[in-house]
Amino acid sequence: MLGIIGRFFHWLGVVIGWIDQSIAAIGIAGGVALAFYNVVARYVFGTSLTWAGELTVYLFLWSAFFGAAYCFKQDAHISITILLEKVPPKVAKGMLLLSHLVTFVYLAAVSWYGYKYLLLDIELDERSIDLNIPMWIPYLVIPVAFAFAAYRVAEKFVEIWRTPPEAVVHRSEAEMILAEMEEAAGEDLIKEVERKTGGML
């Protein structure tokens, strides 16, 4: 039974990750392409798409929100760890659990109230100015993206909960970059970087 539940959450995470990455990539690529086309059309051909500006904003917004949700999976958001590095491992683990719990509650609350606002907007039948589409479509990004982000934070909470306090490792951004470089290119590159930077990294 636990194996089935584990596989379910594994595949749920895979699907959510694929959705986050796909929307973030398509949104930023589509927004840049559309903005570029509209600028060229306006200044070269003297014409432009009236709805392009509005759609570009929506594409960038969706890309940013789903990209931010994906960053929770990668631990890519900025975090201040100086205090965690100074306290005992058990205290650091407790602080991490508390911070993830607070983050989860916040993200879940925004998702829930975003959903409630979505229902209100559907009832009011608000429409966009240029595209003339129902506004609940662009607003849908709030409940969905924040729900995905909350799920990722819950994943991290469980992961930290299962990790022994001594194994909750806190490294600086430079240390993480060096570790990734070491995995990708071996120790020779690390030694060369350390030689050129005088061991500053």
Image (cartoon, helix red, strand yellow):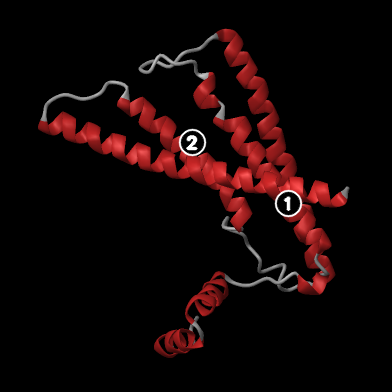
Which element type, helix, strand or loop, lies under badge 2? helix
Residue at x 75% of width, y 45% of height: 8
Residue at x 54% of width, y 25% of height: 139
Q: Which mark is residue 62?
A: 2
What amino acid type should be assigned to the residue bearing mark 2? Trp
Q: Is residue 65 above or below residue 178?
A: above
Q: Which x, y percent locates residue 11?
A: 68, 47
What amino acid type should be assigned to the residue bearing mark 1? Glu
Q: Which mark is residue 155?
A: 1
Furthest residue to the top?
124
| Label 1 CA crowd tier, 10 Å (few <14, some 14–19, many 20+) | some
| Label 2 CA crowd tier, 10 Å (few <14, some 14–19, many 20+) | many
Along the horizontal axis of the image, is 168 left or right of 41?
right
Q: Which x, y percent locates residue 85?
A: 71, 72
- Whether residue 94 is visible to the viewer of this picture, yes or no, is no
Residue at x 69% of width, y 44% of height: 12
Q: Please report contact status of discs 2 and 1: CB closer than 8 Å, yes or no.
A: no
Along the horizontal axis of the image, is 43 left or right of 82?
left
Q: Which x, y percent locates residue 83?
A: 70, 67
Q: Which x, y percent locates residue 173?
A: 55, 69
Query: Which of 184/40 is in front?
Result: 184
Q: Examine the image and state in which quarter residue 140 appears.
A: top right
Query: Which of 8/162 is in front?
Result: 8
Q: Is residue 192 above or below residue 57?
A: below
Which element type, helix, strand or loop, lies under badge 1? helix
Sequence-wise first label, 2 or 1: 2
